[in-house]
Amino acid sequence: MQQPMPHQLMGYDRAITMFSPDGRLLQVEYARKTVRQGSTAIGVSCKDGVLLVADKRIVDKLIIPESVEKIFEVDSHILATGSGIMSDAHVLIERARVKAQQHRITFDNPVDVLSVVKDIASLNQITTQSAGWRPFGVSIIVAGIDNDCPKVFEIDPTGIYFQYKATVIGEAEPEIEEILNTSFSDNLSITDALSLCLDALKKVLGKNFSIDRIDAAYLSSSENGIVRLSKSEVEAASKGKLVRKGVK
């Protein structure tokens, strides 16, 4: 009796436009596996704003930590980060920046966060059904504030997006997701959320945890513009001693 051939031998994993017999697009699944190998990034919607915390995962001691950027400004009210192939993330985030600026020029007001998310998700989806392309090997977290309302979205390589109270992507996703499910509260402030994220990264990284690896930034409903946390501020937050300016 002839044995069924593995997907790889049949070629279903080589073409993005070809479904396997069990209804799967294997190239898309491989892209999602790439995300799970990327460095960890966390997004949290807080009562007073939004927070992104990302692991730079610096593996070469000769690299200058400050030169590695993991959190990006899309507009004055929108932040983004990614996990997976970061060069793919740069393409998507640059597209989001153009979308935001075009909206400002055309309508003379800031773009809403969901419009940016939909634009990125639309391009992701196109790559899942276009011959000669490959899916983007990155998931993106987009965080912003619309009319004093904090919003956090996650977009995966398939083009699917969801709004979250808190979300995590990357290599430590299962462990940190469990921590967020247990410890997240609707009353979390940005300061409290930062401490929660750093504690979670400490647990999953163990002895590899270092302040040099952390990139953190937030948008506050009461402060203007994006605030990037310095190394000393991240260190203070890891010890529960961070005091944000203008916040009691």
Image: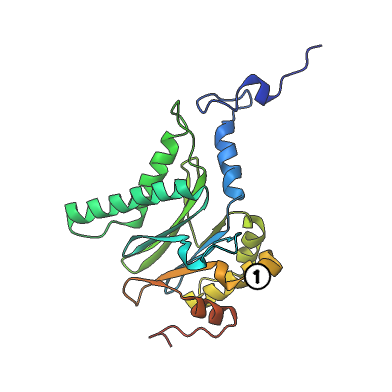
User: For this rendering, which residue is in front, 200 or 34?
Assistant: 34
- Name the residue located 58 percent from the left edge and 54 percent from the top edge: 170
Query: Which residue reaches farthest bottom?
Result: 248
Q: In the rendered image, which residue does mark 1 sit on?
A: 202
Asked if residue 200 lies left or right of residue 132, the reply is right
Q: Secondary structure at mark 1?
A: helix
Spot occupied by residue 173 in the image (x, y as percentages of width and height)? 62, 56
Relative height, residue 247 to residue 215 (above, below): below
Residue 64, can we see it? Answer: yes
Location of residue 29 by image quarter: top right
- Name the residue located 56 percent from the left edge and 58 percent from the top edge: 168
User: For this rendering, which residue is in front, 81 or 167?
Assistant: 81
Residue 189, can we see it? Answer: no
Spot occupied by residue 96 in the image (x, y as percentages of width and height)? 34, 51
Q: How many marks?
A: 1
Query: Which residue reaches farthest top?
Result: 1
User: For this rendering, which residue is in front, 23 or 229?
Assistant: 229
Mark 1 is surrounded, within 10 Å at the Cα level, by few (under 14), some (14 to 19) or many (20 or more) other residues, namely: some
Relative height, residue 175 to residue 228 (above, below): above
**Looking at the picture, which amino acid does disc 1 mark?**
Lys
- Name the residue located 67 percent from the left edge and 21 percent from the top edge: 9
Q: Quadrant of the N terminus?
A: top right
